[in-house]
């Protein structure tokens, strides 16, 4: 057990930090009904990284990070512009198209790399086991600053996520605030993808938020339930991956899915009782 904590404390701490910011953002994403926006932005960030790789930079270099961030900013701009008061085309459709194009482009670019298959695997599920202390400190400080920023403007962000029509009626510049939301969201996703990969980031964003929404309506209660779910799943996933020698990212994703099914069944039983 001592060896377990000695080896796994860094990935566990990184997962807990991911839980803190992603649960909050996930609740916003679900309220906006743009479930796959995280997956799309994560894939766009991965596309930026693949472009950097094509130019000869290492996957986890600072230059690659800035390539990813620039790509994500462009994605955030697209998503903020395409949200309108009266939608003819659902924004989710646009998000899906952007995701598919970004994924296809990344695969095309990586086909030119000698280590393309390994880069694709890393892009999808990452390798949280390799997270370093400087990376942990970086995301902790960055996500804390972004968390404070969102808390300060929480009423605006909550209004445009939950009651966009009312926000338009009040004369708010919804497109501008959408851009701010997606920019901050993109910074989080870009940093998270470098550590955890596209699929694990998506799981941390959506699954705890869905689990919380099953049992609560109040935002503060949803946050607490989401954080609790993310914490328990992180510990279970990392423990199972360590003792059964499974890939950590993939294991956590599967545990997320299993826990969500169990919670959904408990919700159904509770309703029937």
Image: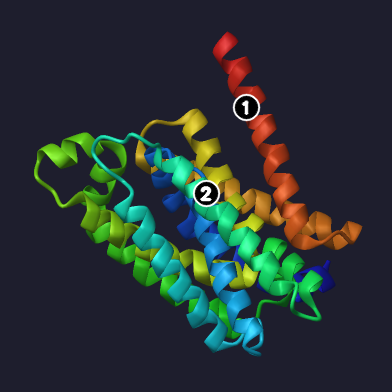
Q: In the rendered structure, which disc, 2 or 1, sits on the residue that comes first in sequence?
A: 2
Mark 1 neighbour class, 10 Å CA radius: few under 14, some 14 to 19, many 20 or more: some
Residue at point 50% right, 59% down? 41
Residue at point 36% right, 67% down? 146
User: Considering only vertical position in the picture, is 223 above or below 147?
Assistant: above
Looking at this view, name the residue that lies furthest to the top: 273
Name the residue nearer the viewer: 85 or 223.
Answer: 85
Q: x and y percent of residue 5 in the render?
A: 75, 70
Q: x and y percent of residue 248 in the render?
A: 77, 61
- Mark 2, secondary structure of its residue: helix
Looking at this view, name the residue that lies furthest to the right: 244
Instruction: Specify whether 227 is left or right of 169.
Output: right
User: Considering only vertical position in the picture, is 271 above or below 200?
Assistant: above
Disc 1 designates what residue? 264
Proximity of marks 2 and 1: CB atoms separated by less than 8 Å: no
Disc 2 designates what residue? 97
């Amino acid at each position: 057990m001592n060896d377990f904590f000695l080896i796994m404390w860094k990935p566990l701490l990184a997962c807990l930090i991911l839980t803190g910011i992603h649960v909050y953002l996930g609740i916003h994403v679900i309220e906006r009904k743009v479930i796959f926006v995280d997956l799309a932005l994560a894939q766009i960030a991965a596309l930026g990284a693949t472009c950097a790789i094509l130019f000869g930079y290492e996957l986890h270099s600072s230059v690659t990070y800035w390539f990813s961030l620039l790509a994500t900013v462009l994605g955030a701009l697209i998503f903020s512009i395409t949200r309108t008061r009266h939608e003819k085309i659902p924004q989710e459709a646009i998000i899906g198209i952007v995701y598919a194009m970004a994924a296809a482009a990344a695969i095309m670019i990586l086909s030119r790399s000698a280590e393309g298959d390994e880069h694709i695997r890393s892009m999808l599920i990452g390798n949280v086991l390799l997270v370093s202390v400087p990376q942990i400190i970086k995301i902790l400080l960055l996500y804390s600053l972004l968390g404070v920023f969102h808390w300060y403007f929480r009423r605006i962000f909550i209004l445009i996520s939950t009651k966009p029509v009312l926000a338009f009626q009040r004369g708010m510049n919804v497109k501008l605030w959408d851009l701010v939301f997606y920019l901050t969201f993109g910074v989080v996703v870009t940093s998270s993808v470098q550590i955890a990969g596209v699929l694990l980031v998506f799981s941390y964003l959506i699954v705890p938020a869905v689990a919380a929404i099953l049992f609560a309506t109040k935002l503060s209660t949803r946050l607490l339930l989401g954080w609790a779910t993310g914490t328990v799943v992180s510990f279970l996933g990392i423990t199972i991956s360590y003792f059964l020698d499974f890939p950590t990212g993939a294991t956590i994703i599967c545990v997320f899915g299993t826990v969500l099914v169990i919670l959904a069944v408990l919700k159904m039983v509770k309703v029937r009782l």
